[in-house]
Image (cartoon, helix red, strand yellow):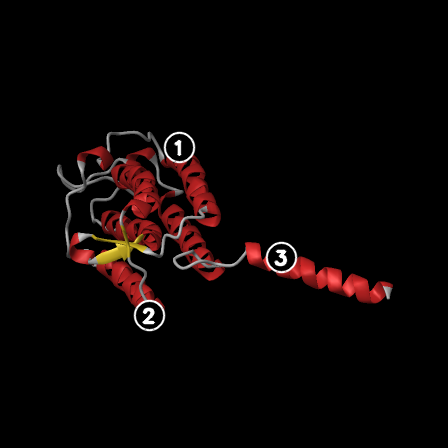
Amino acid sequence: MKKYVSTITLILVWIIGSSFNTLKEGDLTKEDRKYVVDYLKQSQKELFSRIKNLSEEQWTFKATETSWSPAEICEHIFKTESTLVKRADAMDTTEWKPQPEDYVNEKVDFIIDFLQNRERKFNAPEHIQPEGQFANAKAFISDFKQKRGETITYVNEVEKPLKGYYKDFGPLGEISGYHWLVFISAHTQRHIKQLDEVLANPEFPI
């Protein structure tokens, strides 16, 4: 009898617990969060691999007067991160318009492909333009680790149904808060390509 009661109790606990963990429409799934977090970690690793050994001369090298140095590229990535997280978080003030999972995944691929195309050039808004914030790569890496860590914490803990809210964003079409989270790493990778262009310049200091 005691064994029977214990079994019933465990079943009830499981049912009650499951009811509190049921995903609602638009919620990020465990798989969504893992995908975004893995992508954030991957893009950070790729970025650091390019800059960790740069001297101060290399850090500030500019191919032309109007092009960005590695320092400026990295500062732009740093400043943009917070803007994109805020944009994702604010999506619950836009239109509730959940889309099929196929659409969600196709839009992820589109965003990544769109940003990887360096033939498309954009002027960064003034508030995310570089201003000489980081004297060297070491200082940047230290601060960026903290900022990217905060982004990862947000992704793991956010409870808003970010996959359900959509808003049109120019060339990207209608995207959700979840897509803005993906955009963060895709944006980082876009500027890693820009970094690679600088590092490959024949005049780059050795």
According to the picture, the residue beneath numbered tag 2 turns out to be 102
Toward the viewer: 154 or 43? 154
Does 76 sit left or right of 34 as displayed? left
Percent coordinates x, y for residue 111 in the rendering: 26, 59
Q: Can you say which quadrant of the picture contains the C terminus?
A: top left
Percent coordinates x, y for residue 122 in the rendering: 15, 48
Amino acid at the residue labelled 3: Ile
Q: How many marks?
A: 3
Q: Which residue does the image show at 20% across and 57% down from the upper left? A: 172
Residue 101 has which mark?
none
Toward the viewer: 67 or 200? 67
Q: Distance between the residues labelled 1 and 3?
A: 48 Å
Percent coordinates x, y for residue 169 in the rendering: 20, 52
According to the picture, the residue beneath numbered tag 1 turns out to be 139
Using the rendered view, name the quadrant where residue 166 is placed.
Answer: bottom left
Q: Which residue does the image show at 40% across and 38% down from the upper left? A: 144
Mark 1 or mark 2: whose residue is earlier in sequence: 2
Q: Can you say which quadrant of the picture contains the N terminus?
A: bottom right
Toward the viewer: 109 or 197? 109
Q: How far apart are marks 2 and 3 (CA)?
A: 32 Å
According to the picture, the residue beneath numbered tag 3 turns out to be 16
Q: Which residue does the image show at 43% across and 56% down from the upper left? A: 28
Amino acid at the residue labelled 2: Asp
Of badges 1 and 3, the one in the foreground is 3
Q: Mark 1: few, some, or many residues within 10 Å (few <14, many ≥20)?
A: few
